[in-house]
Image (tube, rainbow, N blue to C red):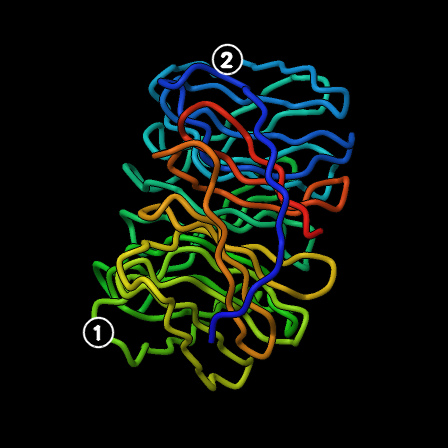
Amino acid sequence: MPHHSTVSISEFAVSDGAAGPYGIAAGADGALWFTLVHHGRIGRLAPDGAVTSYPLASASSGPSLITAGPDDALWFTEFRAHRIGRITTSGDITSFPLPTPDAGPFGITTGPDGALWFTETNADRIGRITPDGNVTEFPLPLTGAFPSAIATGPDDRLWFTMNQANAIGAIGLDGDVTVHPLPTPASAPVGITAGADGAMWFVEIGAGRIGRIAPDGKLDEFALPDSGSRPHAIATDADGTCWFTEWGANRIGRITPDGHIDEHPLPTPSSEPHGITRGPDGAMWTALEIGTLARLTTV
């Protein structure tokens, strides 16, 4: 059910509008790191507001989602180059090819085992890469599932969305996969995050809903006021509230662990919000494809 709170939103220009800020993560250096999906670059917004960006080997590699690694570097997927990238906080870049051709890596997260786990959208696989670049791949029991975002759960499994299979998956460190079908048809889940309540929270871009799944598979869904808002990414803040981007409605939403929802329009029209993360400063930050990052705080 909707309720109201006040959120302050500030925008910071980090690129031109064609570069497409997309994924975003907090770095160990206190900066925000983000992908520039259309220009093949990784960007950095320092605490003092200085912006730097680092070119990848190919401008068309399609850097997508990004996460802080166990080694204090940032790790990211190169969707169109079919590689996993690593950038240190000083800007040194390494890129690792994947064994499966045309794998289309997209989501990535640090696992409980000190490795990076990622999805292969085109190959129906979940991948694992160690900090020294050793890659293992695990096949899913479905074809055409389009595994998308991935996050570590409280049960030390990796939980991921299957956008085209209308399901949520969980994979153990041994590669054992469990599939949980979603009750709403064509919900097309994308972003997923670990909540403070011991469950995983995810967005249904096709159905305009926020989902919650417990480790035992119990599912709940919460309808957004606008079913066409196209929720895309989701992240948890310090008090356990989940924040999510509404890519189709130019809004940021919040949902509490008990299912209360509020929504906040972004100040710039048609800004195309994508990734969202809790920043080093405790605020929530989102990447806007128009070339800015937005900072959101509750007041």
In this view, the residue in front, 232 or 296, is 296
Q: Which mark is residue 55?
A: 2
Mark 2, Cα crowd under 10 Å, few <14 / some 14-19 / many 20+, is some
Q: Which mark is residue 170?
A: none
Residue drawn at x 46%, y 51% is 233
In this view, the residue in front, 263 or 280, is 263
Q: Is residue 44 above or below residue 274?
A: above
**Quick one: SS at disc 2?**
strand
- Looking at the image, which residue is at 49% across and 68% down? 171
Q: Identify residue type, mark 2.
A: Pro
Numbered disc 1: secondary structure: loop
State the image coordinates of residue 175 (x, y, percent, origin top left).
49, 66
Q: Is residue 28 left or right of residue 15?
A: right
The residue that appears at 47% across and 83% down in the rendered structure is 217
Q: Which residue is mark 1?
A: 185
- Find out whether the residues at labels 2 and 1 contact each other: C-beta distance under 8 Å: no
Q: Compared with residue 203, is residue 275 higher up or lower down, i.e. above or below?
A: above
Q: Earlier in the sequence, mark 2 or mark 1?
A: 2
